[in-house]
Amino acid sequence: MTISEVQNNIIEEFSFSDDWMDKYNLLIDIGKDMPVIDPKYKVKDFLIEGCQSKVWLHPVYDGKLISFTADSDAIITRGIVALLIKVLSNRSPEEIIATDLYFIDKIGLRQNLSPTRSNGLLSMVRQMKLYAMAFQASKK
């Protein structure tokens, strides 16, 4: 499935209701379904700076694709990082770097987060793209 197809599926999934309480519940469910990060990666080296809650993000690069695992101590934030992983995991560094994450605005996520959570979302995206840039540079 392409990145656009995954984003369009997320948009469709979130279009079931205009009520943000329902959408928060969906985010919580998505976070609960995310595979658990290995506890050995819940350390400072994998902690994302700029998030109000704690978010750990671990990348694995096999030379072609990057896969991510993550966790958070906040249930909504866990759902947000799970969405990002759904879109960006198992992609090439080039795909991750070039991706426009339009689903964030289409589902109203950025507009319905507190300023600190919104900053955390940007920090998560930035960290995923930084990992992709580092892995891309290591190939050369």
Image (spheres, rainbow, N blue to C red):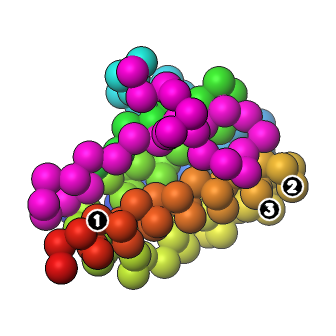
Q: Is residue 68 above or below residue 42?
A: below
Quarter of the image where the N terminus is located: bottom left
Q: CA distance from mark 3 to mark 2?
A: 9 Å
- Label ID, residue 115: 2
Residue 23's image quarter? Answer: top right
Give how far across and how far down residue 53 sits, in percent.
Answer: 73, 34
Instruction: Name the amino acid, label 1.
Output: Phe
Instruction: Name the amino acid, label 2.
Output: Pro
Give the mark toward the camera: 1 or 2.
1
Q: CA distance from mark 1 to mark 2?
A: 30 Å
**Boundaries of the magenta span:** 40-66
- Residue tagged 3: 111
- Residue 63 is inside the magenta segment: yes
How many numbered badges does the structure rendering display? 3
The residue that appears at 72% across and 45% down in the rendered structure is 51
Give how far across and how far down residue 85 sits, in percent.
Answer: 41, 49
Q: Secondary structure at mark 1?
A: helix
Give how far across and how far down residue 47 sits, in percent.
Answer: 57, 39
- Residue tagged 1: 135
The residue that appears at 66% across and 33% down in the rendered structure is 54
Residue 39 relative to residue 71: left or right? left
